[in-house]
Amino acid sequence: MVIQNSFTIIPLIIIITINYTLFGFFNGLIWSWFTSIIAAGIWFYGSRYFFNDWVQKKTNPQLLEKMEKSGFLFVFQARIFPFIPTSLINILSGLSSIRFKHFIIGTMLGNLIFFFVLSLIPAGIMEGDKEQNILLGITLILVGFVFFYRIKRRQKRRKQLN
């Protein structure tokens, strides 16, 4: 997972499928999720304290400003949607002033939802009981969207108070 979080050259679905095959659905999901959190934390601190000067020169300051305004929400959204490379999220978060607590909670929640959905792919292929897995996936996605909606609503309230 550290290599995948570093360079994003290995597709995440392959790693999750390997973990599913080795450990089963639940344990494979937990192992993939846990190692991704550790790897993200390593790269967050690495980019914040060791590579900051070098990477800061190559980063757009307006992008960092946008990230810093939303913090947790940016990380959470970026983790759920598969279009943003994990290495980019880790490095940019480390360069910004996002607090580690917000970064790690956003990573934990976002990766849990995303990894669960990705784990359903090998589960559906390797097991014949697809209906149950699909219902669980849809339920988890809906819970994630409700959680996301509540966070957005709180942020709007805070902005209105300020």
Image (tube, rainbow, N blue to C red):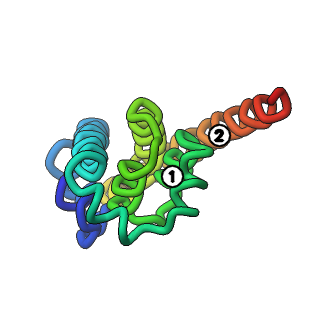
Are the residues at dot 2 and dot 1 in contact (C-beta closer than 8 Å)? yes
Q: Which residue is mark 2?
A: 148
In three-dimensional space, the C-alpha distance between marks 2 and 1, rounded to whole angstroms, equals 10 Å
- Residue drawn at 26 percent across, 38 percent down: 34
The spot of residue 107 in percent (x, y) is: 41, 42
- Quadrant, the C terminus: top right
Q: Residue furthest left?
A: 22
The quadrant in which residue 159 appears is: top right
- Inspect this view and state whether residue 122 appears: yes
The spot of residue 46 in percent (x, y) is: 22, 49
Q: Which residue is mark 1?
A: 80
Does dot 2 land on a helix, a strand or a loop?
helix
- Inspect this view and state whether residue 28 appears: no
- Residue drawn at 73 percent across, 30 percent down: 154
Does dot 1 land on a helix, a strand or a loop?
helix
User: Is residue 4 shown above or below 130?
Assistant: below
Residue 3 circle label: none
User: Is residue 17 shown above or below 162?
Assistant: below
- Residue drawn at 67 percent across, 34 percent down: 151
In this image, 30 relative to 92: left or right? left
The spot of residue 76 in percent (x, y) is: 52, 45
Inspect the image, locate mark 2, and give the three-letter code of the amino acid beneath it: Phe
Q: Nearer the viewer, residue 15 or 5?
A: 5
If you read the primary sequence from the N terminus, does the residue marked by circle 2 or circle 1 appear first?
A: 1
The quadrant in which residue 144 appears is: top right
The spot of residue 8 in percent (x, y) is: 28, 67
Q: Residues within 10 Å of mark 2 (few under 14, many from 20)?
A: some
Q: Nearer the viewer, residue 155 or 108?
A: 155
Q: Nearer the viewer, residue 118 or 48?
A: 48
Inspect the image, locate mark 1, and give the three-letter code of the amino acid beneath it: Ile
Q: Residues within 10 Å of mark 1 (few under 14, many from 20)?
A: many
- Residue drawn at 64 percent across, 34 percent down: 147
